[in-house]
Image (cartoon, grey):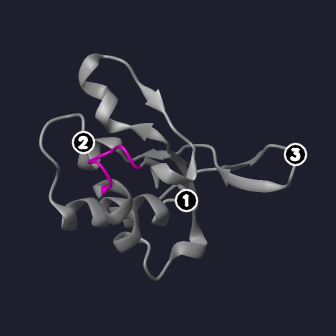
């Protein structure tokens, strides 16, 4: 099986896979959430092929995507880098506007 190549990201020496795994569709956005065991298998397969950069957000689910990743990475967290978007205020999504909050009270 071919391995995904790595590349430097930024100027601090971080190295990640050239291809990432976007995790939004596992818990939200494209129909009902997928079976957890299938998604954990998919995450492990991606890592086994060399994907080390995973993209998630607290808004996916909401919160269920990051919980899923926590379960999948429980014993292998040191093999990947996580990119997460945060601070999207879900209460504002219904009116078509996105509100971003980074204040401590939000969490």
Q: Quick one: which residue is furthest to the bottom in this view?
A: 75
* Residue 5 image position (x, y, % from top left): 65, 50
Q: Quick one: which residue is furthest to the front in this view?
A: 105
Which residue carries the number 3 mark? 11
Mark 2 crowd level (few <14, some 14–19, many ≥20, 10 Å Cα): some
Which residue carries the number 1 mark? 50
Query: 8 or 58, which is in the foreground?
Result: 58
* Residue 45 in the figure: left or right of residue 49: left
Q: Which residues are magenta?
A: 58-63
Residue 3 vs 100, above or below: the answer is below
Q: Quick one: which residue is furthest to the top in this view?
A: 96
Question: Which residue is depicted at the point 80% across and 43% down?
Answer: 10
- Disc 3, SS: loop
Question: Which numbered tag is attached to residue 28?
Answer: 2
- Disc 2, SS: loop
Question: Which residue is depicted at the point 12% across and 43% down?
Answer: 32
For marks 1 and 2, give the one nearer the viewer.
2
Mark 1 crowd level (few <14, some 14–19, many ≥20, 10 Å Cα): many
For marks 1 and 3, give the one nearer the viewer.
3
Distance CA(mark 1)–CA(mark 2): 25 Å
Distance CA(mark 1)–CA(mark 3): 22 Å
Is residue 2 inside the magenta stretch? no
Query: 3 or 47, which is in the foreground?
Result: 47
For marks 2 and 3, give the one nearer the viewer.
2
Q: Tag 3 or tag 1, which sits nearer the N-term? A: 3
Is residue 60 inside the magenta stretch? yes
Question: Which residue is depicted at the point 20% across and 63% down?
Answer: 36
């Amino acid at each position: 099986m071919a391995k995904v190549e790595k590349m430097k990201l930024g100027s601090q020496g971080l190295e990640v896979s050239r291809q990432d795994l976007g995790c939004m569709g596992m818990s939200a956005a494209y129909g009902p959430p997928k079976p957890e065991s299938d998604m954990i298998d998919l995450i492990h397969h991606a890592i086994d092929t060399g994907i080390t950069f995973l993209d998630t957000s607290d808004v996916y689910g909401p919160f269920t995507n990051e919980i899923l990743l926590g379960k999948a990475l429980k014993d292998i967290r040191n093999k990947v880098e996580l990119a997460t978007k945060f601070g999207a205020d879900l209460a504002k999504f219904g009116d078509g506007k996105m509100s971003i909050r980074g204040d401590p009270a939000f969490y």
